[in-house]
Image (tube, rainbow, N blue to C red):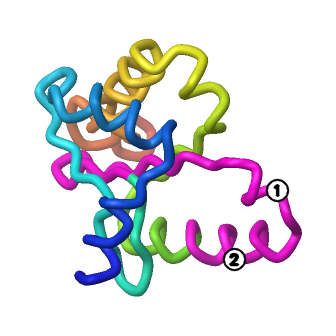
């Protein structure tokens, strides 16, 4: 929790700009910033949609960081979250459009429930 608090104080410019949009609850979705999930702290998280947003700056391009990010994303997905990683430059270029795209993606479920049980063997659908 102390680390989360520190990260909230030290957010990068793209993270601060995106937070100004996400805190307005686009499409009625509540996002948290610098939210802990297990041993990791994610940039933004919508708990109701089980959706995580990570803003990646140039530091994420280094090979050591890439391997760490892969393990981190795998852990987050194993815990039932969808993960969207965004380039910091894209956030800086059009923060409002990025926030809207995030909300659309978070609001759309990964799987749509079927209209009923699958047809029995030999029945047409």
Q: Secondary structure at mark 1?
A: helix
- What residue is shown at x 11% (from left), y 27% (from top)? 28
On screen, residue 101 above or below 65: above
Q: Where in the figure is residue 107, as x and y percent of width and height?
A: 27, 30
Disc 1 packing (10 Å; few <14; some 14–19; many ≥20): few
Label 1 – label 2 distance at C-alpha: 11 Å
Q: Quadrant of the N terminus?
A: bottom left
Residue 97 occupies quadrant: top left
What label does residue 61 carry, if any?
1
Disc 2 packing (10 Å; few <14; some 14–19; many ≥20): few
Q: Nearer the viewer, residue 14 or 100?
A: 14
State left or right for residue 25 relative to residue 95.
left
Q: Where in the figure is residue 43, as x and y percent of width and height?
A: 41, 55
Q: Nearer the viewer, residue 34 or 105?
A: 34
Q: Quadrant of the C terminus?
A: top left
Q: Secondary structure at mark 2?
A: helix
Q: Nearer the viewer, residue 95 or 112?
A: 95
Residue of label 2: 68
Q: Residue furthest right?
A: 63
- The answer, for residue 124, to whether it is visible in the render is no
Question: Residues in magenta?
Answer: 44-73
State left or right for residue 44 relative to residue 13.
left
């Amino acid at each position: 929790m102390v680390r989360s608090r520190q990260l909230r104080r030290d957010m990068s410019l793209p993270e601060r700009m995106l937070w100004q949009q996400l805190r307005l609850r686009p499409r009625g979705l509540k996002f948290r910033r610098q939210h802990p999930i297990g041993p990791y702290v994610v940039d933004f998280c919508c708990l109701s949609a089980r959706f995580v947003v990570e803003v990646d700056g140039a530091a994420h391009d280094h090979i050591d960081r890439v391997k760490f990010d892969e393990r981190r994303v795998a852990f987050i997905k194993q815990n039932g979250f969808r993960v969207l990683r965004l380039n910091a430059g894209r956030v800086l270029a059009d923060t409002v459009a990025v926030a809207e795209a995030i909300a659309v993606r978070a609001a759309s479920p990964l799987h749509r429930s079927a209209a009923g049980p699958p047809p029995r063997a030999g029945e047409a659908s």
